[in-house]
Image: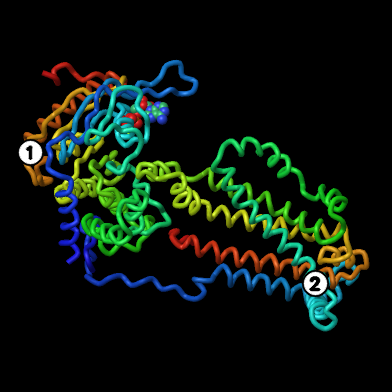
Amino acid sequence: MTVTSFDEIAAPAPKTGALPERPTKSYYQRNDGFIVGTVSAIVAIVFWEIMWQAGFIDPLFFSGPSATLARLYRGLWTTGDMIPHIIFSAQNFAVGFTCAAIVAIPLGIALGWYRTPRMILDPFITVLYSTPRIVFVPLFVMWFGLGFLSKMVIVFLSAFFPILLNVMAGVRTTDDQLLGAAKSFCATQGDLFRTIVLPATVPFIIVGLRQGLAHGLIGVVVGEFFAGSKGIGYLIGQAGTTFATDLLFACVIVIAVAGLGISAILQRVEQHFQSWRPAQS
Amino acid sequence: MSVTTATDTAAADRAAAGTSSQARLTARHVSKAFWVEGEQDPTIALQNVSLTIDEGEFVCIVGPSGCGKTTFLNLVAGLLPYDEGSIEISGKRVNGPGRDRAVVFQQSRLLPWRTTFDNVLYGMQLHRRFSEAEMQKRAQDYIDLVGLHGSERRHPAQLSGGMQQRVNLARALATDPEILLMDEPFAALDAQTREFMQAELLRIWQEAGKTVMFVTHQIDEAIFLADRVFVFGTRPGRLRAEFEVPFERPRRLSIKRSPEFLALTDQIWSLIEEEASRAGFMQPAPAESRS
Ligand SMILES: Nc1ncnc2c1ncn2[C@@H]1O[C@H](COP(=O)(O)OP(=O)(O)O)[C@@H](O)[C@H]1O
Ligand SMILES: [Mg+2]
């Protein structure tokens, strides 16, 4: 062992002279959350399928796992009748969400940092954020028609505020002590921004994107549900009115998988930026 | 070996600092008041403080809590404007932070997302004074000097409190300031680590040869470290007394138990006790404790 500081000299030396071994964890210990979660989900699905096979579930109002998967297979592969709807929704979502992130992140940083624009925009943000965005759907249909544009605007507006508000909060909670220390080393405004405010805000940006993602997915489905003749939301509406429960459940799976997938990507991004944080269990 | 290089860099900085016996810091009639929302009168944090610190000197400021020690340090650091008087560093008037000063704060205030090495680089990067290659070399040299060799890649959360303050000290020293300003840097450490850090600071100070203004509320810490001790009084915050510390250097921790050390501690303590009781923190000291 090399002595690196007085802190370690002051500590009592280990009696045996041998270094303690790196604690080893079994595969289960490292992944207990994932394993338990998977098992409980599988148990629930198996139980559901048994009930379905036994005929306890009325296919008019509910579906079973095997029927849902069969419909999904047909919709994505054999007939492919779900594909155009999925592509349409994915485009709406991708364009709306990306635009929301591109506008909301810089705007949130600017509003968090500068007082005057924040005071000017604050009433608008408060009112728009506390109003359910769904009430704007008829308005957007009037303005932008039944197609792509109105859906995109709904997604944009749904995802925009969670991102904006989280980023603003991140900038405003930046540690004053760190800013003071940097100022004592003659930091410019740009330095403070680049070396402290931005890195400190990264976790808030990620949280904002994840919330924006959830709201954006709601936005895309609700928007198509209300108006138009295309998209996953439209398909769900159709399936509901025609009692096609297997199609309805297949659509739900598509949306859930999309949400989980994007969420997982954001989690990876977060881990990349947060590697300096002490490990938490 | 890297330790010799560290000494060389420190020695070069020391030589470049020059040997003129000009005053490093001159404060004349400095006053500072704070207006607090909802209060009728301002808090006079400092009133009419005048003092000088010489080139290469180690000076401590002690006083009861709230006597304006931190405020004075912030004025010297240029982090707060002063109301009256003047503060000069090497003859240049202070108005704002400058590359001639570096502060070591009580909480280490390291960037949690940067490693030890990158935190030590940080002060120099903000100063924009050294080339990239120089910064790399200086960072390593001062990390070695403060005894953190081997911890370069760790993040602050993986360091003990004492190690964090070493990083903080290395970050300040690496910028090659003319005067180092330290605000109770060891107050958050346990007693044992604090004593080691005091001894370490003296060793580092002797190698780096910087002028140091060190603020503390601990009298024994002040006497052990300083060439001179300034005692601040409270309400309003002002300079009460100045003591020369006679012990020769290098000093060992054992001098803290010598009769001369204890006598000086007593003398300063009764002065501070008087101040603290004036401020209503404790009962007035019995009359016979002051001769
Ligand atoms: N930013 C501030 N606003 C108002 N009052 C302050 C501020 N900073 C310090 N003070 C007051 O000035 C006095 C001196 O404070 P400080 O310099 O922190 O004392 P010390 O460091 O000696 O404990 C105290 O009475 C404190 O309440
Ligand atoms: Mg203080």
Q: Nearer the viewer, residue B165 or B277?
A: B165
**Secondary structure of the residue carrying numbered label 1:** loop
Residue positioned 82% across, 47% down in the render: A135
**Whether residue B287 is situated above or below residue A172 in the rendered picture:** above
Q: Amino acid at mark 2?
A: Ala
Mark 2 is surrounded, within 10 Å at the Cα level, by few (under 14), some (14 to 19) or many (20 or more) other residues, namely: many
Q: Nearer the viewer, residue A17 or A77?
A: A77
Decide if residue B61 is on the left or right side of residue A60: left
- In this view, the residue farthest toward the bottom is A78
Residue positioned 54% across, 48% down in the render: A170
The x, y position of residue A41, in whole percent, is: 68, 71
**Whether residue B152 is situated above or below residue B247 in the rendered picture:** below
The x, y position of residue A33, in whole percent, is: 57, 67
Disc 2 designates what residue?
A250
**Whether residue B184 is situated above or below residue B146 in the rendered picture:** above
Q: CA distance from mark 2 to mark 1?
A: 84 Å
Decide if residue A224 is on the left or right side of residue A25: right
The x, y position of residue B193, in whole percent, is: 24, 49
Q: Is residue A5 visible?
A: no
Residue positioned 63% across, 47% down in the render: A165
**Secondary structure of the residue carrying numbered label 2:** helix
Disc 1 designates what residue?
B247
Q: Amino acid at mark 1?
A: Phe
Decide if residue B87 is on the left or right side of residue A78: left
Quarter of the image for the N terminus of chain A: give it: bottom left
